[in-house]
Image: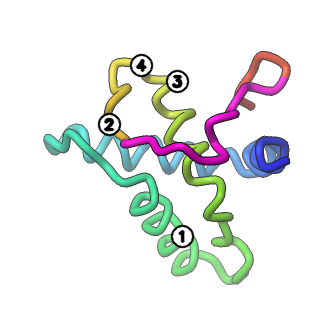
Amino acid sequence: MGNLNFHEFHRTNPNIFASFQDQVFKAIKSGKKKLSARTIIEFIRWNLFIETEDDSAYKINNNYIPYYARMFMKDHPEHGGIFELRGDAALDFEPVQGKFF
């Protein structure tokens, strides 16, 4: 169920993953070898909160965080170990109809 909810959220909010990728690449460029997907999402939430007038604009379900980490590593296998993955609901992460979007 969470997988389908994530895909719907991602389809309607592609800017979140774009921001997520931007922050990961900034960290990689600065020499970081390990990152926290949660910290990146919190940073994105904060920026959306400050930059928008709509309080609902920065609501990103915490359950989606592992999906963003996994999606990044699937899209960028050269950075496959950048996030530590744990056994959780995101283990069933699979693309919908062969795509992540």
Determine the CA span between mark 2 and mark 1: 21 Å
- Left or right for 46, reference 17: left
Under mark 2, the amino acid is: Ile
Q: Quadrant of residue 55?
A: bottom right
Q: Position of residue 82 (x, y in %)?
A: 32, 37
Question: In the rendered view, would you say 18 is above or below 39?
Answer: above
Mark 2 or mark 1: name the one nearer the start of the chain: 1
Disc 4 is placed on an element classified as helix
Question: Which range of residues does the magenta coloring cover?
Answer: 84-96
Q: Do callouts 1 and 4 mark residues in contact (Cβ within 8 Å)?
A: no
Mark 3 or mark 2: name the one nearer the start of the chain: 3
Determine the CA span between mark 3 and mark 2: 11 Å
Q: Nearer the viewer, residue 87 or 57?
A: 87
| Residue beneath the point at 74% across and 21% down | 99
Disc 1 is placed on an element classified as helix
Q: Do callouts 3 and 4 mark residues in contact (Cβ within 8 Å)?
A: yes
Q: Position of residue 59 (x, y in %)?
A: 68, 71
Dot 1, how many residues are within 10 Å of its Cα: few (below 14), some (14-19), or many (20+)? some
Dot 3, how many residues are within 10 Å of its Cα: few (below 14), some (14-19), or many (20+)? few
The residue beneath circle 3 is 74
Disc 3 is placed on an element classified as helix
Disc 2 is placed on an element classified as loop
Determine the CA span between mark 1 and mark 4: 26 Å
Under mark 4, the amino acid is: Pro
The residue beneath circle 2 is 82
| Residue beneath the point at 63% across and 77% down | 52
Q: Do callouts 3 and 2 mark residues in contact (Cβ within 8 Å)?
A: no
Under mark 1, the amino acid is: Arg
Determine the CA span between mark 3 and mark 4: 6 Å
The residue beneath circle 1 is 45
Under mark 3, the amino acid is: Lys
